[in-house]
């Protein structure tokens, strides 16, 4: 669970990473205050929320540097990177041979590894 302190609300990202010392809301350590990277696995029922209102809320988390939207029905990852001027820049990766560099974590993932073991229906012609 991640706190959006500016709004007094909580969200439940699919993946949460804190680089460095994690800061929690209380002694139970179940609510992170300083995520560096958040990722959501897009589903038909949540993709509009994940791209819209939820992402707007995530903008209010000062520590957040990177937001990933991961498609579950095809190999596509949308990467949003926070810039020094607080703008978010989008990069889209849609080829299994693509390498996704997670700037905030200093590592690179191959889309082939992200989607390893998954087969997708071929588009109809």
Image (spheres, helix red, strand yellow):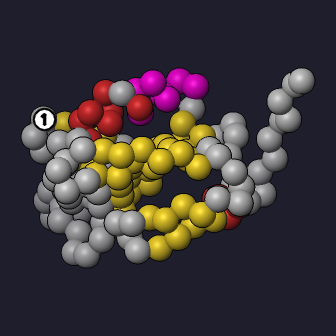
Tell me the residue at 32%/33% (across/down): 54
Q: Is residue 41 left or right of residue 6?
A: right
Tell me the residue at 47%/48% (across/down): 91
Where does the image place residue 93, in percent across and percent down from the top left?
A: 59, 49
Q: Quadrant of the C terminus?
A: top right
Neighbor class of circle 1 (other Cα within 10 Å; few <14, some 14-19, many 20+) is few
Q: Is residue 124 left or right of residue 27?
A: right
Q: In the rendered view, tell whether residue 5 sits above or below residue 116.
A: above
Q: In the rendered view, tell whether residue 24 sits above or below residue 108.
A: above
- The residue that disc 1 covers is 7
Let me know if residue 45 is in the magenta part: yes
Is residue 52 visible in the rendered image? The answer is yes
Number of labels in the image equals 1
The segment highlighted magenta reads 44-50
**103 or 36, nearer to the observer:** 103
Element type at mark 1: loop
Tell me the residue at 57%/32% (across/down): 43
Tell me the residue at 30%/66% (across/down): 18
Where does the image place residue 6, in percent across and percent down from the top left?
A: 10, 40
Let me know if residue 36 is in the magenta part: no
Q: Is residue 14 left or right of residue 33?
A: right
Where does the image place residue 10, in percent across and percent down from the top left?
A: 24, 40
Is residue 30 visible in the rendered image? The answer is no
Q: In the rendered view, tell whether residue 21 sits above or below residue 72.
A: below
Q: Is residue 69 left or right of residue 87?
A: right
Where does the image place residue 90, in percent across and percent down from the top left?
A: 42, 44
Q: In the rendered view, tell whether residue 32 sits above or below residue 50.
A: below
């Amino acid at each position: 669970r991640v706190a959006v302190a500016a709004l007094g609300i909580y969200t439940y990202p699919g993946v949460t990473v804190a680089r460095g010392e994690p800061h929690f809301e209380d002694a139970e350590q179940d609510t992170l205050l300083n995520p560096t990277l958040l990722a959501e696995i897009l589903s038909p029922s949540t993709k509009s929320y994940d791209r819209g209102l939820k992402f707007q809320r995530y903008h209010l988390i000062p520590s957040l540097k990177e937001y990933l939207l991961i498609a579950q029905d095809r190999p596509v990852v949308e990467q949003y990177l926070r810039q020094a001027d607080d703008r978010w820049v989008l990069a889209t990766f849609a080829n299994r041979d693509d390498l996704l560099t997670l700037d905030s974590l200093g590592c690179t993932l191959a889309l082939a590894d992200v989607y390893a073991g998954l087969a997708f229906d071929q588009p109809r012609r």
